[in-house]
Amino acid sequence: MCKALYAAEAVKLVNEKAHVKLYHSTCHTCMHGLFYYVVQSEGGVSAVGLVTDAAGDDALRLANSKVVTADECISTHRIVSNQSQDLCQNLLDIREKLA
Ligand SMILES: [Zn+2]
């Protein structure tokens, strides 16, 4: 995000399967987290990065949690779409309580 260089000790291996590794690191400058998949194949090595607000401990917990299914995503989308007014009001109520 801020283009700072990551220290080697800030990069943690979260999960590893055959030819695929998931790493997480936290930038010491802006404190953003980053997940990156590194895939090794016969054609070489490729990597995909994803910015996250997950900290290192969250990364380990998420890597071992149950996978969200497509049906659960669709169900959540429908609930949010059909009840968006109630959802927004609840979020505003929570925000007022936290202020
Ligand atoms: Zn940064």
Image: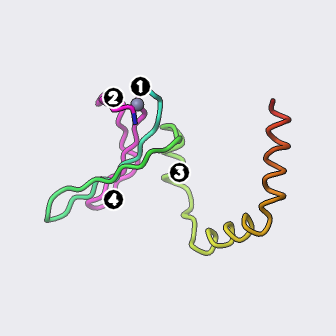
Q: In which quarter of the image is the N terminus?
A: top left
Left or right position of 61 against 22: right
Report the front residue among 79 and 8: 79
Q: Label 4 vs label 1: CA separation?
A: 28 Å
37 relative to 11, above or below: below
Q: Mark 3 points at which residue?
A: 62
Query: Residue 26's x, y, as percent?
Result: 43, 33
Q: Which of marks 3 and 4 is nearer the N terminus?
A: 4
Q: Which of marks 2 and 3 is nearer the N terminus?
A: 2
Instruction: Please report contact status of discs 4 and 1: CB closer than 8 Å, yes or no.
Output: no
Name the front one of labels 1 and 2.
2
Instruction: Classify mark 4: residues with Cα within 10 Å, few (<14), some (14-19) or many (20+).
Output: few
Q: Residue at x 54, y 42 (%)?
A: 58
Answer yes or no: disc 4 within 8 Å of ligand 1.
Answer: no
The question of residue 8 being in magenta is answered with yes
Query: Residue 55's x, y, as percent?
Result: 51, 37
Q: Mark 2 points at which residue?
A: 4
The question of residue 23 being in magenta is answered with yes
Report the front residue among 67 and 84: 84
Q: Give, as a three-letter code, the residue at label 3.
A: Leu
Q: Mark 4 points at which residue?
A: 17
Query: Residue 45's x, y, as percent?
Result: 19, 56
- In what element is the residue under mark 2? loop
- In what element is the residue under mark 4? strand
Q: Which quarter of the figure has residue 34?
A: top left
Answer yes or no: disc 3 within 8 Å of ligand 1.
Answer: no
Instruction: Please report contact status of discs 1 and 2: CB closer than 8 Å, yes or no.
Output: yes
Answer yes or no: disc 1 within 8 Å of ligand 1.
Answer: yes
What's the magenta region? 2-29
Q: Mark 1 points at which residue?
A: 28
Q: Give, as a three-letter code, the residue at label 1.
A: His
Answer yes or no: disc 2 within 8 Å of ligand 1.
Answer: yes
